[in-house]
Image (cartoon, rainbow, N blue to C red):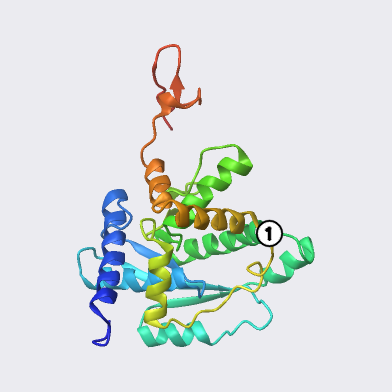
Amino acid sequence: MTAEFTPEQVKLQKRLHRNVWKAIDDYKLIEDGDKVMVCLSGGKDSYTMLDILMHIQSTKKYDFEIIAVNLDQKQPGFPEHILPEYLEKVGVNYKILNKDTYSIVTEKLGEGKTMCSLCSRLRRGTLYTAAEELGVTKIALGHHRDDIVETFLLNMFFSGKLEAMPPIYKTDDQKHVVIRPLAYCKESDIEVFSELREYPIIPCNLCGSQPKLQRKMVKSMLREWEENYPDRTEIIFNSIKNVSPSHLMDKELYDYELFKMIEPPIKS
């Protein structure tokens, strides 16, 4: 951070760093010998994630590599030069993947339909393939605390299940470990930090402009709650970390006849 930044802005940076450190320590997100693929979309979240992980790498507490990876989905008007120029400037190892998922999504779904789900699946598949080819041990995604809370409410309201975004998980095929270093970071902090850093933001024109997306509805609802009842999002987030299976109704987790937790099956 430059000398022109105020004490409050420096405090913001320290808060973000502290939150990422805490997530790393709480969930062992990064370990010595890791090669971390930082998925860079060109949005505020992924720029901030890369920035903070590069700072953590510079402290030498963990000996790990970083490779920033961007997927160019061939959206019309996508400024291909911005990310390579930025990554060259900050001096990080990087790779640009080229795959025309835009044409696949628009052809299959047509104008006006929600594209996020299909787009995400195609993007994940491409990134997982790249991770295998690059020999990375961790795949870092830029989801923050608000994304986790929104996903929790989306699953509860629209899918009838209690599920959010864990800070770390293995993919279904057990091949990849995915981490979310920004899991404890507020979106509002990331927004301010991004403006201070003057990142060259690239907007997503594929799905960001579609109206009435369920996530937008939940985000708006949370914003209204925060205005009337401050810290609601923080309290909901804390509830995800403070679960009492015996006080829910999932018979796969708790035996209501023997009154004890059910042991998960041993994997061979």
Please give left or right for residue 165 compared with residue 123 in the image: left
Residue placed at 41% from the left, 42% from the top?
A: 240
Whether residue 172 is visible: no
Q: Position of residue 45 (x, y in %)?
A: 45, 68
Q: Residue at x 57, y 53 (%)?
A: 218
Residue at (27% x, 86% y) in the render: 2
Position above or below: 99 against 158: below
Position of residue 261 relative to residue 65, above or below, is above
Q: Looking at the picture, which amino acid does disc 1 mark?
A: Lys
Instruction: Give percent across and percent down for residue 28.
Output: 30, 51
| Picture mark count | 1
Q: Residue furthest front?
A: 228
Q: Nearer the viewer, residue 53 or 36?
A: 53
Rendered-image quadrant of the C terminus: top left
Q: Residues within 10 Å of mark 1 (few under 14, many from 20)?
A: few
Residue 117: percent from the left, percent from the top? 65, 56
223 sits to left or right of 230: right
Residue at screen point 32% across, 49% down: 27
Which is more toward the observer, 235 or 62?
235
Specify whether 62 is left or right of 128.
left
Visible in this render: residue 220?
yes
Residue sitting nearer the eye, 233 or 38? 233
Image x and y of residue 198, in percent: 41, 83
The residue to which callout 1 is attached is: 212
Q: Secondary structure at mark 1?
A: loop
| Image quarter of the N terminus | bottom left
